Image (cartoon, rainbow, N blue to C red):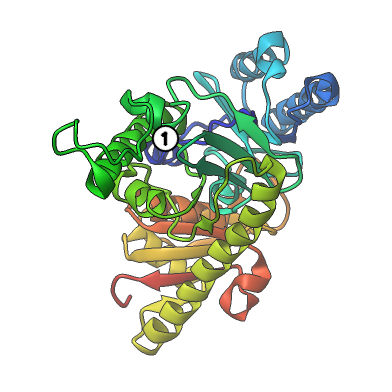
Amino acid sequence: MLHVDTPTQPELQALVAERNPASVSIYIKTTPQTQNIGSAGITLANLIKEADVQLEKAGVDKRTRWAVTEQLEDVTEDEEFWTFQANSLAIFASPDSHRSYRLPTHLESVVEVSDRFFLKPLIRAISMPHHAFVLALAENEVRLIEVFSDMPAETLRVANLPKDAASAVGTRTVNTRSHSSGRLHGSEGQKVHLRKYCRMVDAALRPLLAGRHEPLILAATEPLLSIYRSVNSYPEFTEQAIVTSPARVPAHELAERARPMLDQRHADSIARFHELFRVREADGRATTDLSRAARAATFGAVDTLLVAIDEVIHGRVDEQTGEVTLVDGVGADNYGVVDEIAGRTLITGGRLLGVRKADIPGEASLAAVLRYAI
């Protein structure tokens, strides 16, 4: 299994709000293949040294720098931690805290030092559809399959997952036509049994999927297709399904059918934004202007924000007015302006989507749909 622990919404909001003059953000490439993880540890050690140099240039005192590097070096020495990784690792450290998240996306290794954390790559990890689950549901078997963009699919072991419908409900078969079981007979009895089976499957998945953001795609045929949809409790359950009997279909074949759905899901969300942007722009409630978006985010006026994940614009955004000041070069006295706008949008309840610059209207650095004109 790809070991992923992307932040929940409250965790992300807490990262956005945290302020410390010695805040270090590190992203490194990793691999779920433990035997090949050694180079990631070496990369992290080098980025820790680079972070310390940036902190020293910013005038951070030695004791504070030591407190930050100690937090980071603890990670390099934790052998058990490195045994279970995903495709990237995000680490956020200050003198008083350390948090790390294993991410499904492939991110470039980078270190940023500022008075706040650099979170845009994390937004990309949450936004991009590189990782999903397929629930292969049939009367005679049920499997949960983890799907990756560039790795083989994997069938997961799920605690308390029923073996099949009949054993789940304690009958020899769910298709009995016998009238000996009271009202549970014929098609009515079958649906009652299958609904119980589906509820048991949903309950078994909850602990594994709790707090996750990956789509869950159902592979099934009627009547299980409709019955499971009616009892599902996972928020990221997709309307689009793989309509086939998944019994004895290999995991890699189901994954191949799921991947285009992930691409289409992402494309649809971008298309919906473009249409909404076009309508709102005519009303003065949409913008790609950096300064206007910064003011809107500061005053809580951004409803939805697209940000370009493939560039960083350095500067500062005034805490009270939202005025933008751009700078040349990287330093501990500045940060990513678009990243800051994204953070303020998140704190005020806005929706974020990290995309390629080519997917943003006018290929701008960001595009914002506003709650009201500003």
Which of the pair 278/299 is nearer the observer?
A: 278
- Across and down, in percent, residue 104 comes to 64, 40
- Across and down, in percent, residue 333 comes to 60, 43
- Across and down, in percent, residue 252 comes to 71, 44
Q: Secondary structure at mark 1?
A: loop
Q: Residue furthest bottom?
A: 282
Which of the pair 8/75 is nearer the observer?
A: 8
Query: Can residue 78 be seen?
Result: no
Residue at the spot 75% in from the left edge and 41% down from the top edge: 151
On screen, residue 148 versus residue 210, left or right, reads: right
Residue at the spot 41% in from the left edge and 52% down from the top edge: 225
On screen, residue 74 versus residue 108, left or right, reads: left
- Across and down, in percent, residue 277 comes to 44, 79
Tag count: 1
Which of the pair 242/240 is nearer the observer?
A: 242
What is the quadrant of the C terminus in the image? bottom left
Residue at the spot 67% in from the left edge and 41% down from the top edge: 251
Which residue bears the numbered disc 1? Answer: 211
Please tell me how crowded label 1 is: few (under 14), some (14-19), or many (20+) other residues with Cα within 10 Å: some
Q: Is residue 217 above or below residue 145?
A: below
Residue at the spot 68% in from the left edge and 26% down from the top edge: 85
Query: Can residue 243 be seen?
Result: yes
What is the quadrant of the N terminus in the image? top right
Q: Is residue 257 above or below residue 163?
A: below
* Amino acid at pointer 1: Gly
Q: Is residue 236 above or below residue 289?
A: above
